[in-house]
Image (cartoon, helix red, strand yellow):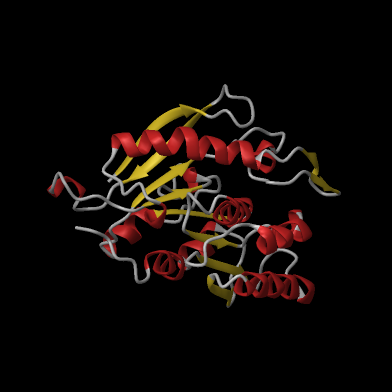
């Protein structure tokens, strides 16, 4: 079951309405006491429905979670669709000065402040969630993948596990590496991170940088699953195929109280 409601999202203009998609497990209505872990997601319009997805293809996440009987609530927030590439600003923790995309102020911390202080309390009050850090996860792809990795590191007191599919580490690799080295991250943190072998601009340099970030994460004793996806590309169809790995990593060895 996926419920949809609108919010006014403040990170960029605070005016345009956004959809929030909330997936509830198949057995959610069967009882009135069981509580569930929560996975927060970026680019929520691409998560569940093809007719809502930017390019007409979603991740099919609801069908996957139903099929696998996953005990998980998913809260997926639509991105900014403005033609000025405001999504890059909302989903970047660092300022961007790129010859292809232009210059943008990074509003990633404003975005996370809204997720943590506005969205999460609302979800915890409306649904039977497990509120604690151990059961609060975050996931995204591309710029959303960058944000997921950033969030689990900088906001480790809130998020315990993250899945970063094709993360846009090009935004500021050095700053991200400094964050990995210096963030007060809990050693029980779990990270899934992948990159497709056929991604845009994928070459030996990208592979080397991706591997180096993984080594930094392992150096912090973070529980890391890192993959180069055979024939993977930068698309919802490719990311859908990674759901068994990403969701499996988030739920692996997780003890959920009855």
Furthest residue in direction right, as rendered: 99
Furthest residue in direction top, as rendered: 15
Q: What residue appears at the point 55 percent right and 45 percent down from the top-left corner?
A: 54
Give the answer, above or below, for where 91 lies relative to 137.
above
Residue 256, by quadrant, is bottom left
**Residue 230: where, in percent of width, then height?**
58, 78
**Residue 212: where, in percent of width, then height?**
71, 73
Give the answer, above or below, for where 65 lies relative to 40.
below
Which sits in the foreground, 15 or 115?
A: 115
Which sits in the foreground, 198 or 153?
A: 153
Which sits in the foreground, 33 or 68?
A: 33
**Residue 188: where, in percent of width, then height?**
47, 67
Left-right relation of 145 to 17: right
Is there any visible trace of residue 19 in the rendered image?
A: no
Q: What residue appears at the point 28 percent right and 40 percent down from the top-left corner?
A: 127
Give the answer, above or below, for where 98 lies relative to 191.
above
Is there any visible trace of residue 208 in the rendered image?
A: yes
Q: What residue appears at the point 61 percent right and 70 percent down from the top-left corner?
A: 220
Left-right relation of 252 to 179: left
Q: What residue appears at the point 43 percent right and 29 percent down from the top-left corner?
A: 6
**Residue 20: where, in percent of width, then height?**
43, 37
């Amino acid at each position: 079951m996926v419920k949809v409601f609108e919010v006014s999202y403040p990170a960029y203009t605070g005016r345009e309405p956004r959809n929030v998609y909330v997936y509830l497990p198949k057995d959610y209505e069967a009882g009135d006491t069981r509580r569930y872990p929560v996975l927060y997601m970026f680019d929520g319009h691409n998560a569940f429905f093809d007719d809502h997805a930017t390019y007409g293809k979603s991740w099919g996440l609801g069908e996957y979670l139903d099929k696998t009987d996953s005990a998980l609530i998913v809260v997926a927030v639509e991105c900014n669709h403005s033609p000025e590439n405001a999504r890059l600003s909302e989903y970047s923790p660092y300022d961007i000065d790129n010859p292809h995309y232009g210059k943008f102020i990074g509003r990633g911390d404003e975005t996370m402040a809204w997720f943590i202080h506005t969205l999460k309390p609302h979800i915890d009050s409306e649904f039977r969630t497990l509120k604690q850090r151990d059961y609060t996860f975050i996931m995204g792809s591309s710029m959303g993948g960058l944000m997921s990795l950033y969030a689990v590191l900088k906001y480790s007191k809130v998020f315990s596990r993250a899945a970063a599919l094709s993360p846009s580490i090009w935004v500021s690799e050095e700053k991200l590496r400094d964050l990995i080295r210096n963030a007060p991250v809990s050693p029980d943190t779990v990270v899934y991170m992948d990159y497709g072998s056929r991604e845009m601009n994928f070459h030996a340099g990208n592979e080397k940088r991706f591997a180096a970030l993984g080594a930094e994460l392992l150096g912090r004793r973070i529980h890391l699953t890192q993959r180069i996806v055979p024939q993977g590309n930068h698309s919802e169809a490719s990311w859908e195929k990674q759901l068994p790995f990403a969701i499996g990593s988030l739920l692996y060895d997780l003890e959920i109280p009855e």
